[in-house]
Amino acid sequence: MKTQGKRDNKSNRYSRLGLLGIILTAVLLLVNINLKSNELREKLDNCSRQIKSFEEHIAEEEQRTIEINNLRDYMKTDAYAEEAARTRLGLVKENEFVFQEESAMQ
């Protein structure tokens, strides 16, 4: 009878050690999953911020494209040609007088 009792004690001890090993493994897995989950959450936040920044940049560039297209269309008009002739080349229309300030002449 004593040998059966020793076997039961050894078997119980191995069962307890096995259960403890399983619990320890499960706890370590949960900790690892939690750490990886936090890392992924941080990466997701960073990616979300980058996406928002890129979307803002795209919106700015789209607005800039609209402005450039408007300027291009304006540059095709007679009004632009007249403005450029007056400001850049100093041309005037026939029967038009240009007055300059005295300080500008010096």
Image: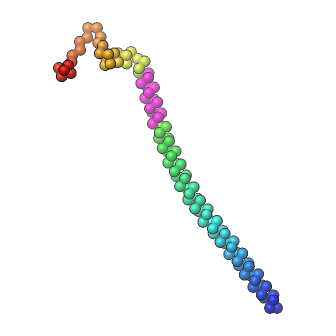
How many marks can you see?
0
1 relative to 47, above or below: below
12 versus 29 height, above or below: below
Which colour assignment does the render follow?
rainbow
State left or right for residue 69 relative to residue 5: left
| Quadrant of residue 91 within the rendered picture | top left
Q: Residue furthest front?
A: 106
- Does 18 appear above or below 74? below
Residue in view at x 45 percent, y 36 percent: 60
Q: Answer whether residue 72 is magenta in the image.
A: yes
Q: Residue furthest left?
A: 102
Q: Residue furthest top?
A: 95
Q: Is residue 101 visible?
A: no
Residues rendered magenta in the picture:
60-73
Q: Quadrant of the C terminus?
A: top left
Left or right position of 10 against 89:
right
Check if residue 71 falls in the magenta segment: yes
In the image, residue 54 sits, relative to residue 31, either above or below, namely above
Q: Residue at x 47, y 39 (%)?
A: 57
Residue 37 placement: quadrant: bottom right
Q: Residue at x 80, y 91 (%)?
A: 2
Q: Residue at x 53, y 55 (%)?
A: 42
